[in-house]
Amino acid sequence: MQVSPHEAFVYLLEVLQLGDNNPYVWFLLGECARLRRRYVDAARLLRRARVMLVVSHGDVEALRDVDAAIAILVEEIGGPEKVNALVTDMDAVDPIALLQPENDDEHDDVVAHENSQNGDEK
């Protein structure tokens, strides 16, 4: 089953309302944000996932997955220096409060791009 990163992100925000103590939900939110090229949000969300895994003595494999996602994000942004310049409040207690505003046009652009890639012009 596949869903768009936007729809997955919205769904995971709803799941987070049931309890914000699951590092895997934070990880998935971070990955959805990264896929949507919302790099500042992705950095904060993935950082939160990593901190939660370390504090809770989480699964070593899960920690490796988060570290791999962070490495990909840092590469996509352009390196550690650019990340440090771009992302403020990296260790924010509530990264959800700092999410960049949603742009409905962004979702429409992503859907249009996906449709054109699949030959489903709409």
Image (spheres, rainbow, N blue to C red):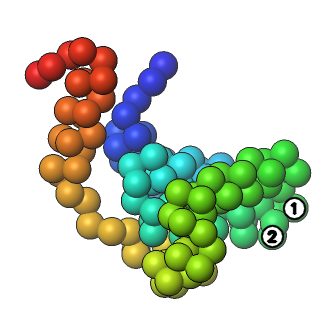
Q: Nearer the viewer, residue 13 or 3?
A: 3
* Percent x, y of residue 27: 61, 53
Relative to 16, residue 122 above or below: above
* Pointer 2 local density, CA inside 10 Å: few below 14, some 14–19, many at least 20: few
Q: Picture coordinates of residue 100 (x, y %)?
A: 33, 68
| x then y, percent, for residue 102 | 25, 59
Residue at the image position 49 percent from the left and 72 percent from the top: 95
Residue 47 placement, left or right of 88: right
Residue 13 in view of the camera = no
Find the distance from the CA under tag 2 to the CA under tag 1. 6 Å
In this view, 114 is above or below 101: above
Name the residue that disc number 2 marks: 55
Query: Of residues 117 and 66, which is closer to you in this image?
Result: 117
Q: Are marks 2 and 1 in contact (CB under 8 Å)?
A: yes
Q: How packed is label 1: few (under 14 Cα within 10 Å), some, or many (20 or more)?
A: few
- On screen, residue 68 versus residue 115, left or right, reads right
* Residue corresponding to mark 1: 57
Q: Which amino acid, mark 2?
A: Val
Residue type of the residue flagged with mark 1: His
Residue at x 27%, y 40% (from the top left corner): 110
